[in-house]
Image: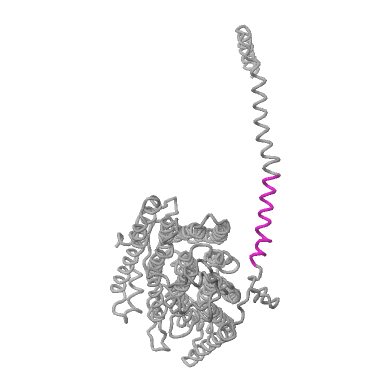
Amino acid sequence: MKIILILIPLLPFLGFLILGLGFSSIPRKATSYIGAGTILISFILSLFIFLNFHNSAISPPHYLATSLPQYFATSPPHYLFSWISIGQLQIPFSFLIDPLSLLMMLMVTGVSFIIHVYSIGYMKDDPGYNRFFSYMNLFVFFMLLLVMGANYPIMFIGWEGVGLCSYLLIGFWFKNHDYNNAAKKAFIMNRIGDLGFLLGMFLIFTTFNSLDFREIFARAKLMEPGNPILITITLLLFMGAVGKSAQIPLYTWLPDAMAGPTPVSALIHAATMVTAGVYMIARSNILYVLSPLTMEIMGVTALATALFAASIAVLQNDIKKILAYSTISQLGYMFLGLSAGAFTGAMFHLTTHAFFKALLFLAAGSVIHALGGAQDIRKMGGLRSRLPKTYWTFLIATIAIAGIPPLSGFFSKDEILLHLFEHNVTWWILAFAGSALTAFYMFRLLYLTFFRNFRGSDQQKHHLHESPAVMTIPLIILAVLAALGGLLNIPAVFGGGSWLTGFLAPVFADAVALSVPPATVSHATEWLLMATTLTGCLVMVFWAWRRYVKQAKGLLPDDAKRSLVVQLVSKKYYIDELYDFLFVKPALWLSRFLHQVVELRFIDRIVNGVGQVVVWTGNTVRYVQTGNVGFYMFIMILGIILILFFNILI
């Protein structure tokens, strides 16, 4: 079993080494097999572990509630070797395989493999083809370390590793200066959050004398809820999640991350980097349940992020940036679920989101590929007849993310909204408004891209074509997953058994036991809530159709200049400009001051002055070297006399 566990992250790393060290000499066909093949084997091995784990622990299904807690109580982390041993600090390199890590392993390897296959067609003409796949493999390696680690330091290695890979992939086309700036922006803003994570780990070790998940959570259960130390720890960890998962105020890097190739956007936004913060908090569920203040702060932040990003997406015209703000908003919903104690609901939405968001980005890449790189939806239209496979898969993903049954997004989003209603009705109302906005901007995107007449150039129209099979087959697979992913957790109100809830129950059992159970709602109320949410979404779908298809409004470049409010929203509330004014410009001014004044006028003058003194001294002393032997003897005797004189005095 250990060999299999080691191979799962090791294979992508070997792919990175092979492609990275020999990328200029390896044929592209071999690169395709190595890049995608290593991820496929990792997925198969993860699936093998899942099936054996499933059979040994929870077979048959009705044992789900009784056998798993006992199984996990007697199943320690898989120890590989002693990594850090300094006094009381003992950190083994070990993996924790439980339902939560298994779910993430399957998503990371499965969705990443589909994106790798798609990339074979999308990147086929790029001169950096081999380098691209080496970076992608390294990204998957670090993400697997993040979700498989049995302690916070291993998670942190993966955490920092995906940050590094995001920098490499966002700035992949490094000859474009703007893309380099976007990569640096992502890297720097993630470091801000990572500082919180690092400080949180320091405080965890100081408090619990361990960094192992199981030891920490076992000792945390003995502490009183609302303990100031726990609140501080969870706030610091949440700071790390805010940076990695693009929540307010550290969200502005994610829209700029669209500078990278479209498969990179799909990889970052689907089941990998941006979901790391959700996974980390779900893994630390006991700490957060015991920190109600942090849960409230997290809920307010998530709600603000979900609404804020959704409102911005309504008036964006770049196809990839609309999806980027959509990701920020959907991450807000995941954190809302976590803040309400719906850990399974958050992970369920993370899972379905991985399917339909990867599909949306890859379908958008198919559109961009057909249009020769164009991304402005105002210059698209009429593509459903020319790109039928792309259109139908994009439609399925749009219905899923809008939360319309029976597709996956309906079930996962409904579970979060139900827990929000039980937790705080005001939060439910605001989250409902965000859900309605999601339906509007996503169908606006669909209608402007695929309906009515084509609005691009004649040259683009002449070259319109469906993407090759290597790109459309991944779209079809993801469309099936986006449509059927809701079957993972069909609720009791529909006669389902909530399989995912039972599967993840052992991971969250202690958190559920320690938390105050919310007031449950009846099936009738649940039906009413679902009907209300669905009605709101359908109204927004109809409104978008009437505005952008029937009346064809909002297609002109100056559409966003109709009012002050619309102008404000279309400019993303000028948050980037505000950050530039508050942080970037002062930092640049300080750096120029330090360079021109401190560096050039003081430090350089001191260094140059020392050099000039040495040169002057050398030029002066060299005259002593006369070549006269008598003079040299006189100096030697004088030196001896001075040495004897000073010895006598001392």
Question: What residue lies at 50% left-to-right and 88% top-to-bottom?
Answer: 530
Magenta stretch bounds: 575-596
Q: How many labels sit on residues? A: 0
Nearer the observer, 110 or 150? 110
> From what the image shows, is residue 557 above or below residue 87?
below
User: Percent position (x, y) of residue 277?
Assistant: 50, 67
Model colouring: one colour
Please tell me in which quadrant of the rendered image residue 622 appears.
Answer: top right
* Residue furthest top as drawn: 630
Snapshot quadrant of residue 355: bottom left
Q: Residue at x 60, y 77 (%)?
A: 555
Magenta portion: prevailing SS class: helix
Residue at far bottom of view: 524
- Image quarter where the N terminus lies is bottom left
Would residue 140 appear left or right of 193 to someone viewing this image?
Answer: left
Q: Is residue 572 left or right of residue 35?
A: right
- Residue 424 makes an appearance in the image: no
Quarter the C terminus occupies: top right
Nearest the camera: 597 or 75? 597
Q: Quadrant for residue 236, please give it.
A: bottom right
> Can residue 60 be seen by looking at this rendering?
yes
As displayed, is residue 321 above or below residue 181? below
Question: How far across and down, in percent of the image, does residue 621 sit?
Answer: 65, 19
Q: Position of residue 182 (x, y in %)?
A: 56, 60
Q: Is residue 460 magenta?
A: no
Of 291 and 298, the residue lying toward us: 298
Residue 576 on the magenta segment = yes
Q: Position of residue 553 (x, y in %)?
A: 61, 82
Horizontal side, residue 587 vs residue 358: left or right: right
